[in-house]
Image (tube, grey):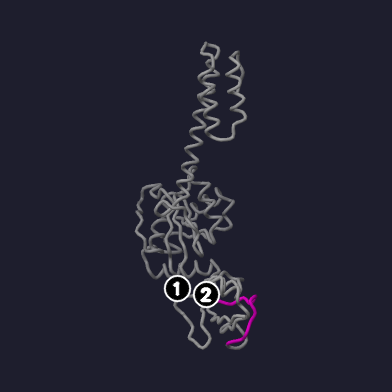
Amino acid sequence: MASLNASPEYYAAENRYRAAKTYDEKMAALQEMLSLCPKHKSAQSILMEIRNRIARLRKEQEKEAAKKKAAKGGKGEAIRKQGFQVVLVGPANSGKTALFNALTGKSERSSAVQFETAEAIPAIMTVKKVQVQVIDTPSMSDEWRGRIIGLARAADLAVGVFANEKEEKAFLKDVPIIAQKVLPLLRGKDYDAFNPATLELLKERLFSALGIVRVFTKRPGGAPDYEKPVALKKGQTVADAAKEISKEIAQGLRYAKVWGSTKFPGQQVGADYQPADGDVVEFHAK
C-alpha cells in the first residue's frame, strides 16, 4: 500500500492490514484506512487503491463461499466417497448428465443448454451386484476447474465424456494433471445413453477399469451368499475383505478357506492371500 501524509491512526490501521491473516481482520483494517485516509486531491489514488483492495477481498470471499457450496451435493451435504467412485468430467454440452442418468437411473435435467448442471451430484450405479458411486459434475469452467480436478484426482476413476475426438484432445490438453487418469468416451461411438445393450457393455468396461474384485462369503457348513459380494480393489487381501464386513471379524481372523482361485476347492489361506474376482471365502476365527 502506498504511503501519504496521513494521521498516525491511519498508519496504525495500515500496519494492522499488513499483519492481518483473516478476512474479517483485513476488511476491518481496510475500512478503517478508508475512513482515516485524507480526502484531498492528491490522496485520490490512495483512496481508489483502498477501495479496489476492499472489492478484491470481497470477491475472494465470495469465491471461497462458492467453492464450499460447490463441494456439496445431494441435499446440501458434502459428497462422501462411498466404496468405488467414478467422476464424470467433460466440456459444456458433452452429454455427461444424459450418461449419468442412464447409468444410475436418475432423472437430472439434461438439455442442449450449456452449463445446465450447476453442482456436483452423486448417485449409485449397480454393476455385477456391486454398487459404484457416480458423480455428475458441471462443465469445466474457471469457477469449477479446481473442484472438478480435485474430485477427479480423489476418485477411483475419472470418465471423460466427449462429442468427438477434437473435443477430447482439447479438454485433456487443458487438464494435463488428470489426463492420464481419464478414461475417454465418445458419445455415439463408445456408448449410446439410450441403448440398454451398449450401456451394459459400458458398465462392464467401467467395472474392469476400476479393478473391482468381488468376493462372496459363506459361513462354515453354509452356502455362499451370491447376492451381496464384498467389493475389493485388485491386490487387496482376505484381511481387507474381513475389514469390509466387520472390525470384529478382521480382528479375530485366524485363516480363511477359498474356493475359486486356489489350487483346490476350500484351500486354507492366510490373511494376506489376494483373492480373485468371483472367489468364495469362508472366514475362521482364532
Choose between 264 and 82: the one closer to the eye: 82
Instruction: Classify residue 164 as left or right of residue 241.
Output: left
Q: Is residue 149 above or below residue 41?
A: below
Under mark 2, the amino acid is Arg
Specify few, some or many for label 2: CA neighbours under 10 Å numbering under 14, 14-19, or 20 or more.
many
The residue shown at (48%, 86%) is 223
Asked where in the image residue 237 lies, by quadrant, the reply is bottom right
82 with respect to 180 (left or right): left
Is residue 241 visible from the viewing direction of this image? no
Magenta-colored stretch includes residue 276: yes
**Image quarter hosting the C terminus:** bottom right
Whether residues under marks 2 and 1 lie with C-beta atoms below 8 angstroms apart, the answer is yes
- Identify the element where label 1 is drawn: loop
Residue 64 in magenta? no
Residue stretch rendered in magenta on the structure: 266-277
User: Which x, y percent locates residue 112?
Assistant: 36, 50
In the rendered picture of this protein, how many numbered marks are placed on residues?
2
Residue under the image location 47 percent in, 37 percent down: 62
Magenta residues, dominant SS class: loop
Give how far across and how far down residue 122 sits, in percent: 43, 58
Q: Say whether disc 2 or disc 1 marks the residue closer to the N-terminus.
A: 1
* Mark 1 Cα-neighbour bin, 10 Å: few <14, some 14–19, many ≥20: some
Q: Is residue 59 visible?
A: yes
Task: State the mark number for residue 129.
Answer: 1
Which residue in the structure is indicated by mark 2?
214
Nearer-the-camera pick, 235 or 15 = 15
Secondary element at tag 2? strand
